Amino acid sequence: MSKVVDYYYTPASPWTYLGHQRFEDIARRHAATIKYKPVDYGKIFPLSGGLPLGKRAPQRQAYRLAELKRWRDFLAVPLTIQPKYHPVASDLAAQLIIAAERAGAPAGSLSFALMRACWAEDRNISDAETLIEIATEQGLDGPKLVAAARTREIATLYDAFTREAIDRQVFGAPFFIYKDEPFWGQDRLDFLDRALAH
């Protein structure tokens, strides 16, 4: 029986960036299929008790920065704690991932390139020209994919993933569901690894 993990995330999340490659390595090791499902946390947060970064209490914002530094150093992953373009609107970037996968391109490597652009390269992933550049750097047809990302078809899929996430009680990023068991956060990957081993 095949192992399938539903992966709900946004390319604007630093925690998704910190865990993305480890998650893909874990899935590969267990021969698990990843279903990449970028979602709109702007719609999920109000329904799940979450707050956008700027509306969180100062002590929570300060602790988030301390944790980002701690995890960056522990994992030895390049990460700018307060990047130039963040908070950032990530709808078009998320839809680019969906469009790429629909076109048969690897969603995982493009997702990571977008996260790295935001969190290590100070690039604006809400800007269409920047998205074209990133997709092109990945060996994809950047202009064609960005055009596809803007279509009603892809927007509808993005909304469907978001509704599915809400229905499955997703509330943060990254969020993994395997055999209906939820795992929230890159710091829960060890538990997902154990679950996939059985």
Image (cartoon, rainbow, N blue to C red):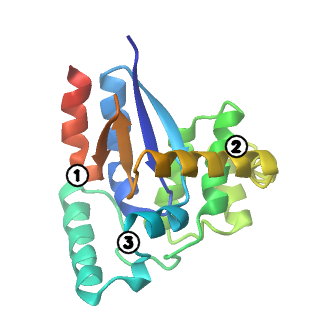
User: Mark 3 = which residue?
Assistant: 80
Camera-nearest residue between 150 and 184: 184
Mark 3 crowd level (few <14, some 14–19, many ≥20, 10 Å Cα) = some
Q: Earlier in the sequence, mark 3 or mark 1?
A: 3
Relative horizontal placement of residue 128, taking residue 9 as reference (left or right): right
Residue at the image position 43 percent from the left and 62 percent from the top: 13
**Tag in front: 3 or 1:** 1
Mark 2 crowd level (few <14, some 14–19, many ≥20, 10 Å Cα) = many
Label 3 secondary element: loop
Q: What amino acid is at disc 1?
A: Asp
Query: What is the number of the mark on residue 187?
Result: 1
Q: What amino acid is at disc 3?
A: Thr
| Residue 137 seen in the figure | no
Relative horizontal placement of residue 100, taking residue 75 as reference (left or right): right
Residue 136 appears at what percent x and percent y?
A: 69, 49
Label 1 secondary element: helix
Label 2 secondary element: helix
